[in-house]
Image: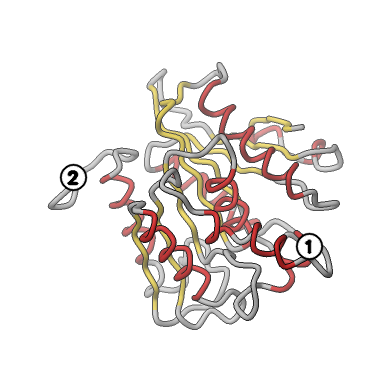
């Protein structure tokens, strides 16, 4: 069951309830304008939710003129099918449900960080409700050796998953032509989630003919978020904004060739 609250109400009351909670960050000065919506999935290895990959990200999208919501997805116990349903329900809610603010129904985006990138990508490739575009930040993609993040895999699938379960839950194996256009960024020396995760997903998108943009920065630790303390990786923010402009989620001067 998905609980929905305005972020000013807080999430404390929903964290002990079954299911996930969606904290809303609407653009308060929208004055009834219809705007895109971005669903934010923080990382944390399916063990916790990284705070710097939640509210700060939502407020960045607010500054770009987009409504946002941070999904506090349920962690213990993890039921993969229920978790994916929660994400799909949040997408459905943003697209179809009447609410105090107006959302452009064909401009629903989703961004996931690390393990949240796995949840975002497996939902975007397998669920019936998909976002219109996808942003993946240093994502966990594969549960196969030797490139998986062991903690995320174990908490999502258990200690000894069958090979077919591992493959079925590796989102690079689930990409089809219906997968939404995707922006990916990571670092070449990420010590927690190897760069091969992003490379595999990008290769699968290419094979399926899905538009994508991939940025691999030479140096940077895992979990940078907005990368405010890392000038090299901070470039992802501007690159992503330009990509969102090309896909008409953000207003502004479109880059040449758009």
Residue 254 image offset from top left, x and y in percent: 19, 46
Instruction: Count the labels in the image.
Output: 2
Pointer 1 local density, CA inside 10 Å: few below 14, some 14–19, many at least 20: some
Residue 157 image offset from top left, x and y in percent: 77, 61
Residue 196 image offset from top left, x and y in percent: 50, 75
> Is residue 230 rendered to the left or right of residue 128?
left
Is the Cβ of the residue at disc 2 closer than 8 Å to that at disc 1? no
Residue 220 image offset from top left, x and y in percent: 48, 78
> Is residue 54 rendered to the left or right of residue 235?
right
In depth, the one of 28 and 43 nearer the eye is: 43
Examine the rendered structure and indicate whether residue 216 appears above or below residue 92. below
In depth, the one of 92 and 232 nearer the eye is: 92
Circle 2 sits on which residue? 253
Colour scheme in the image? secondary structure
Circle 1 sits on which residue? 155
* Residue 177 numbered mark, or none: none
Foreground disc of the pair 2, 1: 1
Q: Quadrant of residue 133?
A: top left
Badge 1 element: helix
Q: Residue at x 64, y 32 (%)?
A: 89
Q: Residue at x 36, y 60 (%)?
A: 206
């Amino acid at each position: 069951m998905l609980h929905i609250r305005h972020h000013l109400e807080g999430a404390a009351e929903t964290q002990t309830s079954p299911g996930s909670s969606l904290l809303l960050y609407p653009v308060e000065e929208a004055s009834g304008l219809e705007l895109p919506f971005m669903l934010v999935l923080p990382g944390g290895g399916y063990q916790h939710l990284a705070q710097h990959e939640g509210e700060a990200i939502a407020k960045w999208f607010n500054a770009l003129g987009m409504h946002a919501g941070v999904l506090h997805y349920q962690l213990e116990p993890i039921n993969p099918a229920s978790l994916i349903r929660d994400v799909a329900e949040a997408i459905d809610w943003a697209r179809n449900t009447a609410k105090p603010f107006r959302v452009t129904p064909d401009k629903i985006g989703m961004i996931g960080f690390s393990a949240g990138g796995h949840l975002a990508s497996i939902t975007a490739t397998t669920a019936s409700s998909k976002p219109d575009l996808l942003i993946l930040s240093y994502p966990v993609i594969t549960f196969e050796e030797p490139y998986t993040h062991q903690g995320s895999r174990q908490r999502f699938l258990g200690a000894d998953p069958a090979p077919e379960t591992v493959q079925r839950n590796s989102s690079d194996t689930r990409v089809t032509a219906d997968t939404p256009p995707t922006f990916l960024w990571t670092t070449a020396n990420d010590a927690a989630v190897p760069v091969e995760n992003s490379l595999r997903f990008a290769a699968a998108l290419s094979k399926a003919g899905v538009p994508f943009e991939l940025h691999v920065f030479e140096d940077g630790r895992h979990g940078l978020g907005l990368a405010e303390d890392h000038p090299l990786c901070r470039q992802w923010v501007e690159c992503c904004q330009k990509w969102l402009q090309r896909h008409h989620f953000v207003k502004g001067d479109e880059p040449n060739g758009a």
